[in-house]
Image (spheres, grey):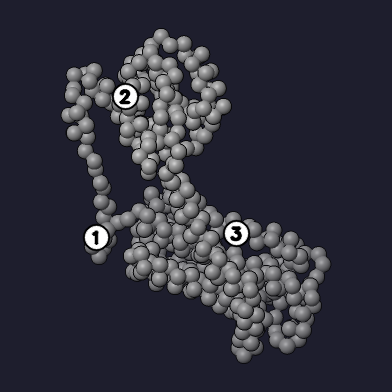
Amino acid sequence: MKKVLAVARWEYVEKVRSKAFIIGLFLTPIIMVGMAVLPTLFATQEDTDTKSIGIIDQSGEVAPVFMERMQLHYTLSNGRPNYVVRPIAVGPHVPLEGAIEEADRDVVDGRLEGYCIVRGTSPADTVVEYRSKAVGDFLLISRMEETLRVIISEMRATGRGYDPAIVRELRARLDVRTVKLTEKGEAEGDFMKTFFSAYVFMMMLFLLIVSSGQILVRSVIEEKSNRIIEVLVSSCTPTELMAGKVLGLSGLGFTQIGFWSLMGVAASVQFGLEIVAPANALLLIVYFVLGYLLYAAIFIGVGSPVSTEQAAQQVTSYLVIILLVPIVMTLPAMRNPDATWIKVLTYIPLLTPTMMALRIPISMPPVHEIILTILLLIGSIVGAMVAAGRIFRIAILMTGKTPSLKEIFRWIKTG
């Protein structure tokens, strides 16, 4: 154990003092927050200049009201209208093809931001089309859609003899309050809080495994290529060396996560946010630690036989893809956390930590499932560590050609 701790201490101290680690410690959360917040800020940023949009209206009734409401309801910070609407062709007998050609030229030449086409001779059979060079301007499109929807609804109400003002008054605004029911009672349910509880856990585990796992593999490859591994093995056994590396780099990874967690707690206290429910935090930490140890064993097992960075990246990329599977399934799992396919994936050891992280904030699994998945992970870690130790013991002194899968399985069996 003394030699294991000596190797672990050397691995930890050597990496924790590096400039790359210190910079990454502060830069990674900044990048993550920036990637989450900045796109939303830019997407919802208000315009600074008035945009000119056009309308072709075959009904002859929508365009005047649309022009008035778009210019009055949406204004810039300086009080000017956000949109100026230009009628291109209005009326049931307008030459539609010629009007569209004219409007297309105006859009391409930059005289119009875009324009909409209200087809049909009455609002009752309207199909609206929007044409622009920037069809990704969802703010403009949603405002146009909402304005046209209200106008057409009012015209239909008028056509059937109803007062549009009464229809507007009767249209209720509904706010749905979600309440999560548990065996202990009820609690306030929040989709965003539930989503981020699972998402933050998975992203932190993903970053820890990818960064620490690659450092672990790179460390072995570097020592093999420099022949330092032969000196190390002369001072301790391969098993002690592997255990020390896993322990030291695990400490490095948990230092990162601990620091980021403190930053998250400080931010949540400062802004009054609750990212993870305290009742779920301890259980999530258990799955986090077990999941990391399982992947650490697999990384060193599959990384020790290779001799080049290129081969290591190719091998570890498959593990990274497996980690991405639960992230892709976040929304489907949130809709139906007790689906059979979700439960089946939960019992695949490589997916167990992240799939349980998805289920716990949404709908707490039964106690027997929690116990079974924890025992499954512990058993998988023991098996992976034993297999990795047998591979590591033989592979660390090998250079040149990468062994085949058949040879690696023979190493594991003969131990």
Task: From the top left corner, tell me how far across and down residue 313 is, in percent.
Answer: 69, 61
358 sits to left or right of 104: left
Q: Which mark is residue 320?
A: 3
Examine the rendered structure and indicate whether residue 7 appears above or below residue 296. Answer: below
Dot 2: what SS? helix
Amino acid under disc 3: Val
Tell me which residue sits at (35%, 31%) in the image. 70
Front residue of 114/204: it is: 114
**For mark 1, what is the residue?**
186
Task: From the top left corner, tell me how far across and down residue 170 is, in percent.
Answer: 18, 33
Examine the rendered structure and indicate whether residue 53 appears above or below residue 395. Answer: above
Q: Earlier in the sequence, mark 3 or mark 2?
A: 2
Examine the rendered structure and indicate whether residue 141 appears above or below residue 64. Answer: below
Q: Quadrant of the N terminus?
A: bottom right
Distance between mark 2 and mark 1 Cα atoms: 48 Å
Tell me which residue sits at (32%, 35%) in the image. 73
Dot 3: what SS? helix
Dot 1: what SS? strand
Tell me which residue sits at (59%, 79%) in the image. 247
Amino acid under disc 1: Glu
Front residue of 151/244: it is: 151
Q: Which mark is residue 65?
A: 2
